[in-house]
Amino acid sequence: MSFKPKYMLAAAALIAGAFAFTPHAGAAPATNAGQKGAYADHLAVANSGELRTIAVTAHRYEFEPETITVHEGEPVKLVLTSKDVTHGIADDDLGIPNTVIYKGKTSTVTFTPKKLGTFKVHCSVFCGIGHGNMVLTVKVIK
Ligand SMILES: [Cu+2]
């Protein structure tokens, strides 16, 4: 009896498929289920595992989204990109160090809000005539 190449390929694909799917099937629901429990009612924003992550895009002269909501005492990571020129964010009250956002690059900054309230975070890099009105509103809630 001789093996036909067609069947061997099919068998190899099945084995590869089994390996590819096994780790995901085991890991994803199991680890998240335990951690999420207490936080299940928190905002529905992408969760990178340990850190809540919010993507913010900057362009003349606004941030998208314009408003983000974060939780007091809960670390959050902002993933920042620019569509046009260099922008930036910084806010002492929120504990956000000056973070420059270059066009074509991704900047990240992680901070833990310590105070409740609504904070207006101005663009920290002069970007043109509307720069003074370029604001990211950060709401810190319980
Ligand atoms: Cu600006």
Image: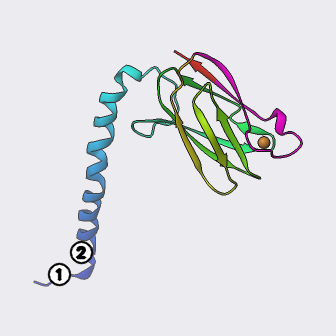
Question: Which residue is at 27% across, 64% downward?
Answer: 16
* Type of amino acid at the residue the image marks with label 1: Phe
**Residue 138 pos. (x, y %):** 64, 26
Residue beneath disc 1: 3
Q: Is residue 15 magenta?
A: no
Q: In this view, does 42 lie above or below 30?
A: above
Q: What's the CA distance linking mark 1 and mark 2?
A: 7 Å
The residue nearer to you, when weighing 58 against 87, is 87
Badge 1 vs badge 2, beta-carbon distance below 8 Å: yes
Q: Does the residue labelled 1 lie within 8 Å of ligand 1?
A: no
* Magenta span: 116-138
Question: Which residue is at 51% across, 20% downward?
Answer: 72
**Residue 53 pos. (x, y %):** 51, 37
The residue nearer to you, when weighing 11 against 26, is 26
* Viewport quadrant of the N terminus: bottom left
Quadrant where ligand 1 appears: top right
Q: How many marks?
A: 2
**Residue 115 pos. (x, y %):** 56, 17
Could you tell me which secondary element the residue under label 2 belongs to? Answer: helix
Q: Residue lying at the far left in this picture: please name it.
A: 1
* Type of amino acid at the residue the image marks with label 2: Tyr
Examine the image and state in which quarter residue 63 appears.
top right
- Mark 2 Cα within 10 Å, few/some/many (few <14, many 20+)? few
Question: Which residue is at 55% across, 41% downward?
Answer: 109
